[in-house]
Amino acid sequence: MKMLKIEWRHLDVDGETCDRCYDTGENLNQEVKRLNRTLKPQGIEVEWFETKLDDSQIPQSNTVLFNGVPIEDVLDIRVSENFCDSCTVLLGNETYCRTVTYEGCDYEDIPAKAIRQAAYKVLGLEEAKTHQAGNSGCNCGSSCC
């Protein structure tokens, strides 16, 4: 069976993570289940695991890697950062963490659609049109959502 390994790196403070990392984790969990339902009959299994980071590793937090390759190297995603209230509360000091721009919209989490598209691209597969709907979580008000 062919295997796709997805790693999710995120801040962990005594078992807690920030809101944006939590949302990415939820998106990842949902998409891996969805991908396995679709791909297992084709002999492909998708597995994900998490790497918990401390406060010295904030620049790596909320990163998703596909077979070791960051999502921004798989898809056309721009990485930046902004103030994170949730991390600031968790860490007790002003914290800026990772955001992404994907399909013209800014996100604080990694959108489910991006996770799905990256998985298909890394596997060298074409995504079936019936599997493209999904909650993007974008608040930009444009038609990209």
Image (tube, helix red, strand yellow):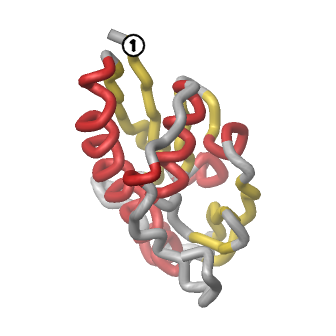
Q: Quadrant of the N terminus?
A: top left
Q: Going by the picture, which residue comes out furthest to the bottom?
A: 141
Q: How many marks?
A: 1
The secondary element bearing badge 1 is classed as strand
Task: Tell me where residue 42 sits by quadrant.
Answer: top left
**Quadrant containing the C terminus in the rendered view:** bottom right
Q: Which residue appears at 60% of the width and 89% of the height? A: 141
Q: Nearer the viewer, residue 42 or 77?
A: 42
Above or below, comparing residue 51 to residue 94 in the picture: above
Of all residues, the one furthest to the front in this rendering is 129
Q: Please, is residue 32 above or below residue 11 in the view?
A: above
Q: Position of residue 114 (x, y in %)?
A: 54, 53
Taking the spot 68% from the left edge, 65% from the top edge, the residue there is 103
Amino acid bearing label 1: Lys
Mark 1 residue crowding within 10 angstroms, few (<14) / some (14–19) / many (20+) = few
**In the depicted structure, whether residue 71 falls above or below residue 48:** below
- Residue 114 or residue 87, whichever sits in front: 114
Residue 106 in the figure: left or right of residue 127: right
User: Is residue 93 rendered to the left or right of residue 127?
Assistant: right
In x, y percent, where is residue 134? 40, 64
Q: Nearer the viewer, residue 73 or 55?
A: 73
Relative depth, front residue between 26 and 94:
26
Q: Residue at x 58, y 29 (%)?
A: 122
Going by the image, does 72 lie left or right of 33?
right
